Amino acid sequence: QVQLVESGGGLVQAGGSLRLSCAASGRFFGINAMGWYRQAPGKQRELVAAITRDGSTNYSDAVKGRFTISRDGAKNTVYLQMSSLKPEDTAVYYCNARLLRLASLDEYWGQGTQVTVSS
C-alpha cells in the first residue's frame, strides 16, 4: 500500500511564506514524478508545480517566481516553498505522485492540506 502524507499548510498573511511537505511511503520501486495541485472553492483542481525524477520542474504561470518545488530522493519527499503569498493562493493543496510499481506506473494523491492567505 502506498501513502502520501502531507504537512505544512495553515493560515498566513498576504506576503508571507509557507512550506509544504509530502512524503511517499509504501511498496514502490521508484518515483517518476511528484507535484502539487490545488483546488479553491468552486474551482477545478489545477497544477501548481511538478518535479520529475531527473529534477526537471514545471510551474503554473500563477506561481512562477514565487513558489519553488524541490525533492529529497533519499526521503521520497517533495517540498513546495511558497513565498509572497496572495489571497488568491488560498486553496486545498494536494500532493500527487506517479510511482513505479512492479509492472505499472501508478498515480497517487495525498489527502490535501488547507492553505489560507488572509489579506
Image (cartoon, helix red, strand yellow):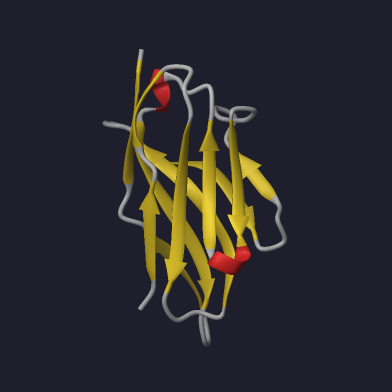
Left or right: where 35 falls relative to 65 = left
The image quarter containing residue 13 is: top left
Image quadrant containing the C terminus: top left
Rendered position, 109 above or below 106:
above
For the point 27% across and 31% down, the residue is 41
- Residue 109 in percent (x, y) is at 38, 59
Locate residue 112, reporting x and y percent.
32, 49
- Residue in the image at 59% along x and 29% along y: 61
Residue located at (48% from left, 28% from top):
17
For the N terminus, the image quarter is bottom left
Q: Is residue 88 above or below residue 70?
A: above
Residue visible at 48% across and 47% down?
36
Q: Residue furthest bottom?
A: 102
Total labels drawn: 0
Q: Is residue 95 above or below residue 117?
A: below
Classify residue 81 by image quadrant.
Answer: top right
Q: Is residue 80 left or right of residue 7?
A: right
33 relative to 12, above or below: below
Where residue 91 sits: x, y (%)? 34, 33
Q: Nearer the viewer, residue 58 or 116?
A: 116
Question: Where is residue 77 shown, x and y percent of the image?
Answer: 52, 59
Check the image and name the residue furthest to the left.
Answer: 41
The answer to whether residue 75 is left or right of residue 10 is: right
